[in-house]
Amino acid sequence: MAKVKTRERILAASLALFNEEGEAQVSTVDIAAAIDISPGNLYYHFKGKEAIIEALFDDFEVELRQVLSAPINRPLKIDDNWIFVYIVFEEINDFRFFYNNLAGILERCPDLRPRFARLTALKEKTANAVLSALEQEDVLTFAKGERAALARRIAAHLTFWLQFATLASNAPQTPRQMINDGVYALMMQTVPYMAADRAAFAGLLSDYFAAQR
Amino acid sequence: MAKKKKKEKAPGGSDMARKIWLAGVGAYGRAFSEAQESIAKVSDETTRLFDDLVERGEEIEDAVESRGREIAKTVRKPSFSIEDRIREMRERLNRVGADADRLSAVETRLDAIEAKLDQLLAAPATTRKAPAKRKTTRKTTKKTTKKATR
């Protein structure tokens, strides 16, 4: 159906433009122009930019929930865990316009606030599940309270990494670089809790991530 | 598979888990496809590979700066790339996640739909220029009420 198709095209173009230019810089007229439809036609599908953002959030939410739920439902293979971190970062990167302006967007779309809070809580729960699995295998070892604290730090890391990386660097970075650095920084946070082989693991990590640059 | 029992581990069991964890990262300094596939089986062959990889980790531990970087450079492209692994795992996660998370996804959707419905019911009819086509039910006037597009 042509109508469905137009809707999807609007969403795809919006996401690309938002991510590329920053959501604040893009108007609905820009979006309509990008896919060569009239502003009126766009308005027929979405009653404004907030409606588009909310529709994009719907998709993002479903996908991120799917990914984050996986290790809660069933532990991953040990060495899949760091690949999993990549996947979470990729998901977030696909939706980076949102993460780059969390406060601004949530203020304009207050309906998203509780939903985003739930997602953030799920990040923490997932981190806890992964850390528990690694603890059970004696890969990591935690004193009382440390695991929960680390899980919380990881959730914060996932939520603010993109913003931080953008602010911390003068030179523009490619998304790939940001993801890589983000995964590295997260993995390094687990090193102090390794039951053994700490130095070797830290060495392998910095070695691997240096090779990715 | 993360399948070892909690308490009564075989001696060296956790050591193996740690090796897998190390090797997982270490692997991408070199080609590692066979070991990846049989990782769960822990055959002699993979054990040997693990030792190899862990040994590499230890080497790097000794000389992270020079030797580690050097090795990493010479083996930039493992035959089983990280991108492949990410893609392959994504597919798996989507399958599993789709089933397990269907319920909460539906819940979330319902929340969203409900909120939108409230919004639509509350909002006054907006009048705006209608799109040129695909609105068979509209009047011929230029101003048309448009709501409930989904």
Image (spheres, coloured by chain):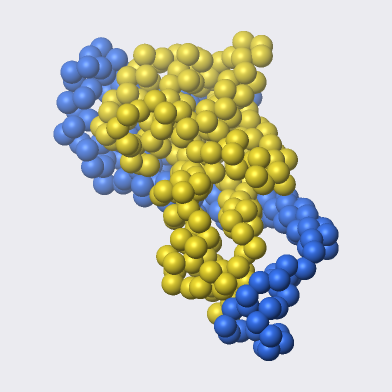
Classify B124 as above or below A36. above
Above-or-below relation of B87 to B64: below
Q: How many marks?
A: 0
- In the image, what residue occupies the spot 23% across and 42% down? B77
Query: What's the residue at 55%, 49% (across, down)?
Result: B93
Q: Residue B109 at x, y = what percent?
A: 72, 56
Chain A shade: yellow
Q: Is residue B120 visible?
A: yes
Q: Nearer the viewer, residue B8 or A191?
A: A191
* Whole-percent x, y for residue A84 in the image: 49, 39
Q: Which chain is blue?
A: B
Residue sitting nearer the eye, B120 or B31: B120
Q: Quadrant of the N terminus of chain A?
A: bottom right
For residue A157, side relative to residue A144 (left or right): left
Where in the figure is residue A165, as x and y percent of width and height? 41, 30
The answer to whether residue B45 of the structure is visible from this angle is: no
Q: Where residue B115 sits: x, y (%)?
A: 78, 55
Tell me where residue B117 sits by quadrant.
bottom right
Compared across the picture, whether A103 is left or right of A10 comes to: right
Q: Judge whether B40 appears above or below B142 on screen.
A: above
Residue toward you, B67 or A95 = A95
In the image, what residue occupies the spot 61% across and 24% down?
A152
- Determine whether, in the image, residue A91 is placed left or right of residue B124: left
Indicate the quadrant containing the C terminus of chain A: top left, top right, bottom left or bottom right: top left
Residue name at image x 45 percent, y 39 percent? A86
User: Dividing the picture into quarters, in which one does residue B6 lie?
Assistant: top right
